[in-house]
Image (spheres, helix red, strand yellow):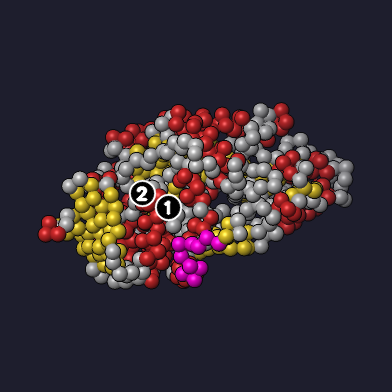
Amino acid sequence: MSQSKEVFTQSLPQGVMLNAYPDSMGIRLADIVELLKRPEFADTFSLFYILPTFFHSDLDRGFSIIDYDINEELVSPDDLADLEKLGIQIKLDLVLNHLSVRSPQFQDLLKNGEASPYRDFFIDWDLFWSAHGSRHENGEVTPHKEHLDKLFMRKPGLPVLKVRFPDGALKTYWNTFYQKVDFAEITALDFAEIKELDSEQAQALADHVKIVIKDKGFLEAEDLAHLPQLTDRIIKAVCSKREYLGQMDLNARSELVWKFYDDTLRKLSEYGAKIIRLDAFAYLHKEPGQPNFFNRPGTWIYLNRLKAMAQCYGLTIFPEIHAEYGTGIYEEIAGEGFPIYDFFLPGLLIDALDRGNSEALKQWITEIVSKGLQTINMLGCHDGIPVLDLRGKTVEGEYRPGLLSDEHIDHAMQNIIDRGGLTKNLYGPDGRKIDYYQVNATYFSALGEDEPKLLLARAIQMFMPGVPQVWYLDLFAGTNDYAAANRGRTAGHKEINRTTLKWIDLEEGLQKKIVLDQLALIRLRNTSPAFRGQLEILPTDSQLLHITWRHADETVTLAADLRRHSFTVYRGEGDQREILMESVP
């Protein structure tokens, strides 16, 4: 981007941010509010990132949004008022790339077809690729190879969902992320209106249709070649038993979509949100001949339009993106005035604590400070641990090294897997796995369920530049939930790190030293004026990490030994030192 243009930089609030679903701790958001009122949580959190089951949703644990109205089963306006009284600002999601099949917009499209005002609200896959692809034997258009090879896939096969309309027409829509299509059991009674079939023929047809759907997942005219005069009526009867779930990509070429974004930002601000995370923003701009992931300049045009909208409502927006360090995308986004997620810290800390070496971590801290990057960092979160973000990358023929070598990244990945982590894959256009994407585990389990390691990781996070975001399950030293991960739901691997804590779990947790010590570190970061000042990394051997923050008369220091997994936090300097916390395994 041009260096001469004026860039408006958004500022993040100060303090520590809690991160949870409305029902992560207890049954409803009201239970979390009651927890935050307890003396153990006094002065700990100034911000709260509430995940999108806050809204009406149906898939992917909230990220398939039906509408942005409050989900009354989990959240009430009184909860939001109580958070405001506690001085806690909230952060919410705008899932930019997609909406649920069950959204009012898609349901109107299903009902009214071409007569729907939302006929261009979602991306008609075949229409999009009509001049840049050829029709495949199974019906949908397949992009020409030079276009297909540029597509970034989040699942095997083409990113599409076929939808049957009430008139029997079959249309293919762009569906980058999750989908689920179920049929209620097909019986002979479903064909009772087709008078040409006797009861025996209807039963034989029901048996045939069940086999086809089990094998293919859908029913087409070619599957009914033996009944050509009845095809349309049979398909209509079968489609009445079909239920779709899916995250349907929005067509950002439609001005109606932009009106929807504006209306949604206004609504989120009315809920009291101050920060809006743009989920899946990098997939929004799509154009034949370009990748469907962070293409330029289209992505920047969209982001700056959104930033201007957000300013009208007093909102700070920041884009959520995973990309290798070597691409430099994080720096490009920051250079346009946006805060960024520090997706590098989780993997850097696991590597540093496993190898007892702080050099890569120091390099990253120095870069954040020297380049003035505004970051939100975390250990764990609702998603996976993004170790591969640390990699280098060849860009325009030049290799840019990562924050860690491939050898150290592979070693960190294998350690987490050996400790029970599950992997998330990326796919090529041919459906073959091409790489790991993330590894799913609780952060405590990723560290080998070693309490001194977890406490040291939290201490380092609290001394990092940026806004520390704390995943509720990390705070309570949660372990991998294999039962949840194995239940077979869409994206079930992520459920390994989303255990709902009942009130008895919270009461027991608040008796544990590992929990209370983390809260003490969080309270220090949230309240000490030193963290509004300057950060300095003191010169040490590679196994040590000493970080000092200074502001006015307040100074706090973390002195950590990454090999022994011990640390001291103290206030003041020289003879005036006051030890605030010591951890010696």
Residue bearing mark 1: 342
Measuring from the top left, give residue 439's x and y in whole percent.
49, 62
In front of the other: 265 or 77: 265
Give the secondary structure at mark 2. Answer: loop
x then y, percent, for residue 319: 49, 44
Q: Amino acid at mark 1?
A: Asp
Residue at figure coordinates x 76%, y 51% from the top left? 144
Q: Is residue 467 above or below residue 303?
A: below
Q: Is residue 375 above or below residue 324?
A: above
Q: Residue at x 60, y 54 (%)?
A: 154
Q: In percent of the image, x 17 and y 54: which residue is there? A: 572
Residue range highlighted in magenta: 399-408
Element assignment for label 1: strand
User: Tag 1: Cα neighbours inside 10 Å, few (<14), some, or many (≥20)?
Assistant: many
Q: Residue at 45%, 41% (x, y): give it.
A: 337
Q: Position of residue 435 (x, y in %)?
A: 58, 63
Residue sitting nearer the eye, 397 or 437: 397
State whether residue 420 appears in this view. no
Residue 123 visible here: yes
Quadrant where the C terminus sits is bottom left
Amino acid type indicated by mark 2 = Gly
Q: Is residue 401 above or below residue 118?
A: below
Quick one: quadrant of the N terminus? top right
Image disc number at residue 466:
2
| Mark 1–mark 2 CB contact (< 8 Å) | yes
| Magenta span contains residue 443 | no
What distance separates the C-alpha of mark 1 from that of mark 2?
Answer: 9 Å
**Where, by quadrant of the figure, is residue 107 drawn?**
top right
Quadrant assignment, res 233: top right
